Every structure is written in structure tokens, then in C-alpha cells.
Amino acid sequence: MRTLIIAATLLALSCPHKSLGADEPGQANVAKTNPAVPPKPAQRTVQLKSGLFQFKVRLNPAVPDPGSVVDVRIEMFEVPPVPDPIYGESIPVKDARMTVDVIDADGAGYPLSMLVHHLQDAGAYGFHFTAPRRDTYRVVLKGEYKTKKFSPHFRMPVGIWPFKNVDAKGHETVVHVAASSARMPAIPGAKRGPAVPGSSNASSVANSTQSVSALTQAMKDMGNAWVELQVAMLAGRRADLARAKTVASGLQSLVDKARPLVPSDPDFADLMKQASDELGKLVKHAGSGKDKEAVRAFDNVASRHCNRCHFVKRWKILSSPEEFPAMLP
């Protein structure tokens, strides 16, 4: 009996004591470390500033899911040195030329560049973007108004919530941005480590790295040339056909050089050939001074060739070129 009493006493001392009305020791920590996730706002608003220009950007939905379409509306204002008698301290900017670059968070590949369209209201612009996968994208608005350039940027999380500086109503703190919009490195993370000298697979890894570097450099060069072509075709009231011919011819040469870089993928070579053929039409029409035909060829390169390659090869949303555009989400 004495043995049983001693054992019971030791057992009681070894167990944590719980007072009436007191919380378990771990409950308070759980509550502190795992706060309730706020509901997603329907719309997100971002305030940006670049030089004398202010931007109010609305994203709908506020927190897009991968594969969903994001509707982006932009209100652009100029802050005058002296308040305007009609608009006060914020004058709507009506005729700005603007493009947008959407860049992966890790910089893999080159930016997706698109034209930002004018909307009906004064100072209003917009574009649509299909978010391919879960990531935090960098969105750069680039343009010029009356010789004054601007390049504000902001982050667009896709499939990620919550994120910093956004309140329950979707409003984000004002961001003062620098003018830089340089492209980030396009080296895949898996290839950043060098092969070990003397290893059995060192030469094969080195050759693979060289092949990847050649392809990523080609993609970067084509992306840069495409931005120049957009400027030639869209920056003025009419397309600069002489410049467009020169830039499109150079881009066509880059596309032709990129065709054999992925010999194991016949679809890639075929996509490059089709893009090259369409660029050839653009060079021909621009050289002949045919505005409408040149614009049509330019639109075809963007909508039928660049986008199709992106959706299949880069974003992996479609499994083959034949699925574009019917199988897009």
C-alpha cells in the first residue's frame, strides 16, 4: 500500500498542473503565432509615384489565382508646380504612351511586355494579364508623356495571401519608386552551381550549362528587340515604318538563330519558324509603306506567335501549340 501511495504521488508531481479557468500552456503561443487570416479583399489599390506623375492602380481580383485573368485599371495624374484652376493639384494625363513588363520574381526568362490601352475616362488606362503560376510578379509601367519618362513598379502576388502593406480593404501604402527597370538575370536556379572538375559528368553538365546560357541569352535578346519594335509601332500617332522595318529584320534574324537551340523539341523550332515568317511579312509591309498590313502583321506576331510560345513553353499552361487559344483557362 505504501508503495502505491508513493507511486501515485510521483505521478501527480510529474504531470502538468492545470488550474481552473487557466489556458493550456501552448494555447496562448498558438494564438499568437497563428493569427486568423483576414479575408481576401475584392479589389486591390496601389498608389505609385514616379517623378511628377502619380498613379492609382486597381487590380481585380485583388489576389488572383494561377491561371486567372487580372483586370488592371490605371489612373495617371501629373502634379503641376502651381495648382491648376480646374483640376487642382492632380491633372489627369490623357495621352501618355505606356507599356507594361511583367517579370518573374526570380528573374527566370525575360519580361512579358504588353501595350497599356487608353480607356474612355480622362487619364484612365488598362490592360489584362493572365497569371500563369503562383509567384510574386514585378509589374513595371514604362512610358513617356511630353518628353518626361516614367517607370513606376509594384509587386503582384498570385496565389499568395496575406501579404505585407495591404489592409483589409485592399489598399496598399504609397510606393516611391526609382526609375530603374533593368531586367533581372535569366539563369535558372538549377544551373547556378558549376560542375565539379574531374567528375564523370562534368563535361555533360558544362555542355548543358552552355546550351541553357545560349538559349536564355537568345530569349533576352529577342525580348529586348520586341520592346524596341513596340516603340516603333506604337509610340507615335502613326507607326514609324522605317524604324519598324529595321528592328523587325533584326528580330527575325534573332528568331532564326534561336531555332536550332533546342534540337530535342521540334515544336520549339516550328514556333520559331512561324514567328520568323510573320516577322518577314512585317518587314515587307513596313518597307512598302503599308501601315495597315504592317500593323496586322505586328499584332499577329504578338497574339498568335509570342503568346502561344509563352503559354506552352514558358508557363506550361498548355501542353501543345495546337491547344492555343481554345484550351486557355
Image (cartoon, rainbow, N blue to C red):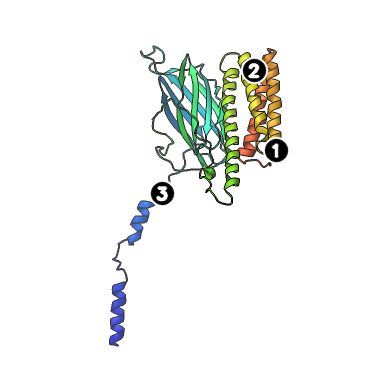
Q: Which amino acid does label 3 sit on?
A: Ala
Mark 3 vs mark 1: give the one in front: 1
Label whose residue precedes the other's in the sequence (2 or 1): 2
From the top left corner, tell me how far across and down residue 50 is, in percent.
Answer: 42, 23
Residue bearing mark 1: 267
Residue bearing mark 2: 245
Q: How far apart are marks 2 and 3 (CA)?
A: 57 Å
Q: Could you tell whether 311 is left or right of 44 in the image?
A: right
Q: Which mark is residue 112?
A: none
Q: Which amino acid does label 2 sit on?
A: Lys
Dots 3 and 1: beta carbons under 8 Å? no
Mark 2 vs mark 3: give the one in front: 2
Q: In which quarter of the image is residue 325?
A: top right
- Give me the residue at 70% from left, 22% from top: 280
Dot 3, crowdedness within 10 Å: few (<14), some or many (≥20)? few
Front residue (pair 319, 249): 249
Dots 2 and 1: beta carbons under 8 Å? no
Residue bearing mark 3: 36
Residue 278 higher or lower than 41, as above or below: above
Question: Quarter of the image containing the N terminus?
Answer: bottom left
Q: Could you tell whether 43 is left or right of 32 in the image?
A: right
Front residue (pair 320, 27): 320
Q: In which quarter of the image is residue 277?
A: top right
From the top left corner, tell me how far across and down residue 226 is, in percent.
Answer: 59, 25
From the top left corner, tell me how far across and down residue 311 is, in percent.
Answer: 63, 37
Could you tell me which secondary element the residue under label 3 belongs to?
loop
Q: What residue type is labelled 1?
A: Asp
Label whose residue precedes the other's in the sequence (2 or 3): 3
Q: Quadrant of residue 266?
A: top right
- Give me the residue at 59% from left, 18% from top: 232
